[in-house]
Amino acid sequence: MKILFVASEGLPYSKTGGLADVIEGLPRALKELGHEVAVLLPRYRGTKADTTLISSVTLPMGDRVRFPAIAEGKPENGVRYFFVEDPEFFDRPGIYGDKAGDYSDNAERFAEFSRTAIEVVKRVWLPDVIHCHDWQTALVPVLLRTEHAADPPVRSLPVVFTIHNLAYQGVFPRSALRKIGLPESLFALDALEFYGKVNFMKGGLLYADYLTTVSRRYAKEIQTAEYGAGLEGVMAKRADRLVGILNGVDYAAWNPERDSFIAKNYSAQDLTGKSACKKDILESFKLPDENLSRPLIGIVSRFVDQKGFDLIAEIADDLLAEDVGLVALGSGQPEYEALFRDLAKKYPARVGVRITFDEALAHKVEAGADMFLMPSRYEPCGLNQMYSLRYGTPPVVRATGGLDDTVQNFGPRSRQGSHQGTGFKFQEYTAEALLASVRAALKVFRDPEAWRTLQQNGMAKDFSWKASASAYVTLYEAAKRSRIPRVARSSK
């Protein structure tokens, strides 16, 4: 099968979040299963392309005409990479915006990207299925089913659309329709209209053949008012075409047995190297060795409300009253950056913070911490909890989305005498529930035998891409069948 991924970011070329990891890991896994895979990305500043395939594509965009180019980069792991090249739109310091906020022309930027994706399909590489990701590519199925509905090369081309985070929808003023060259007829309740504005995500949800999101639990959650971000009715309407498929982990990069970033490698059978990793992370955060005997809590995250930092702020002093160490790596909302700076000043011997993102340091935190804190308000999938399991760093999480799907609560001894579970979960989104869950983890930590069992339980879990890639193949095949005309089906 030939599969074209269309996404706004993807490693090794561009990244702002977990989407980029998926666009690297899933195509590679599909290639290993024997499929032909290509990825289409914008050519951002610093992205190298080897060949210009088409120097100019003529695209009508409202009252303007634009002329992006189509380029190709070096293959990675057998996956081909194509790029949409338009310096005015994509040669910028940021991918989606800058310190002042989102770019004001994002509707035009990603509408052009989506339009060019269809030209890539028609003129460069015709796939069996297109796999689009998030609002930035949501116009691909819209355009295919409207402007290109009678276009022979692409009119029957199936589209799978993945929601990585429903909270980000690409909502723009009604005037955006004219700027991107879409007809007013699409400003309707059963199309792109959303409370008087234009919603790209809604278009993808309505016009794609199948929808996926990145965990089974999140697929259910987004059909409710609490998590649906105003689109719960659309999600419920399309529930028969919505599938939750868990993101995978790249164990080539995230494996304590061969991780080159950490102080000493270790395994589930021999955890002795984890002590060296703890000493190393304490040194990295300039915390004294006295913390070697304390339970060390690690955080690697965007410091935002979604990730539960309002709860952490409520319990910070109570948490540190438990005589724990804390290391936090990340950046985000100013109030939470200030929270950790203040905690580091108040508890200089026990709290370390780095307001940045550092890939090497993220690996060191996963390996060196004793437990990992991830109390998200919602979490479509999450990757750090799965990294933590493999690194023998039991996670403390809220039971939502992918966190609920991947972490089993550590319970009492079974009849066979062994503890079950891989981490600690709490249900209610309250500071009290979070603190109680951390205290439950600390209680187990004081029992070395039980803690080792807990670590080994987590390290035995396999969240590699292989199973998820197979599930996507099944979905691609269903999407292909769904586009077969009824007459053709009945003739078989």
Image (spheres, grey):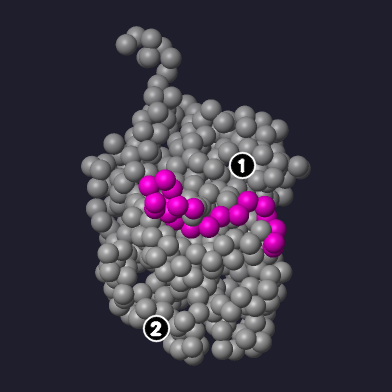
Q: Main secondary structure of the magenta part?
A: loop
Residue shown at 59% from the left, 61% from the top? 437
* Picture coordinates of residue 152, whole percent (x, y): 40, 28
Which of the marked residues, 1 or 2, is nearer the chain's N terminus?
1
* Picture coordinates of residue 339, whole percent (x, y): 67, 77
Q: Amino acid at mark 1?
A: Ile
Of residues 450 and 15, the one nearer the viewer is 450
Q: Quadrant of the N terminus?
A: top left
Residue shown at 43% from the left, 48% from the top? 414
* Picture coordinates of residue 245, whole percent (x, y): 45, 42
In the drawing, does residue 51 fall left or right of residue 21? left
Q: Start and end of the magenta stretch?
A: 412-432
User: In the rendered image of this protein, does residue 110 appear above or below residue 184?
Assistant: below
Question: Which residue is situated farthest in the right direction here?
Answer: 196
Question: Which residue is the site of mark 2?
Answer: 280
Total marks shown come to: 2
Residue 46, quarter of the rendered image: bottom left
Residue at disc 2, secondary structure? helix
Nearer the observer, disc 1 or disc 2? 2
Q: Quadrant of the C terminus?
A: top left
Q: Is residue 226 visible?
A: yes
- Does the segment drawn in magenta span residue 426? yes
Residue shown at 50% from the left, 64% from the top? 444
Residue at disc 1, secondary structure? loop
Of residues 285 and 360, the one nearer the viewer is 285
Question: Which residue is the site of mark 1?
Answer: 222
Q: Amino acid at mark 2?
A: Asp
